[in-house]
Image: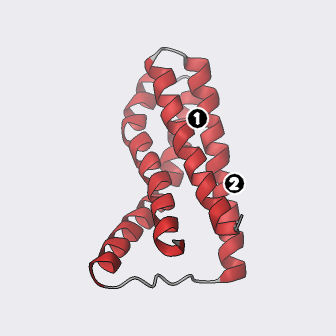
Amino acid sequence: MTHAAFNAGLNTLSAGLLIAALVAVKRGRIAIHRALMLAACGVSTLFLASYVVYHVRVGHVRFLGTGWVRAGYLAILLSHVALAVAIVPLAGRTLWLGLHDHVETHRRWARWTWPLWLYVSVTGVVVYVMVYH
């Protein structure tokens, strides 16, 4: 497995954990939800560290597609990067609120944070597929 494939696997795992955490909270399984969200945070943190190491070693990886595929790739990449930067403080604040039992405020933040975090995880895999396959 390549380093890039490993990173895509971490993004896939993060997305799966986020979805499982949503199912758990909808079913009232708060302890499971909490564990899954902490796992998603850990996996996403591992992804970020691995991503930085990879790009320090390899540098920029160029997308070779042209035409409308390139335009689509750039739109996905731009939204992915912008939201990846934004999700760090959003997720940190949302997790802090949840861990400190500020339930109502946590829910308000999570309504925005969760879908954005899922989007970042899924589009990370989409970018990987578009660049490497």
Q: Quadrant of the N terminus?
A: bottom right
Name above or below for residue 11 compared with residue 130.
Answer: above
Q: Nearer the viewer, residue 115 or 112?
A: 115
Circle 1 is placed at which residue position?
Answer: 37
Q: Position of residue 82 (x, y in %)?
A: 42, 65
Circle 2 is placed at which residue position?
Answer: 46
Residue pictured at 41% horizontal, 69% vertical: 77
Q: Nearer the viewer, residue 118 or 5?
A: 5
Q: Quadrant of residue 49?
A: bottom right
* Residue 44 placement, left or right of 84: right
Q: Position of residue 75 (x, y in %)?
A: 33, 70
Q: Residues within 10 Å of mark 1 (few under 14, many from 20)?
A: many
| Tag 1: amino acid | Met
Q: Position of residue 113 (x, y in %)?
A: 43, 43
Question: Label 1's element?
Answer: helix
Residue pictured at 54% horizontal, 16% vertical: 29
| Tag 2: amino acid | Leu
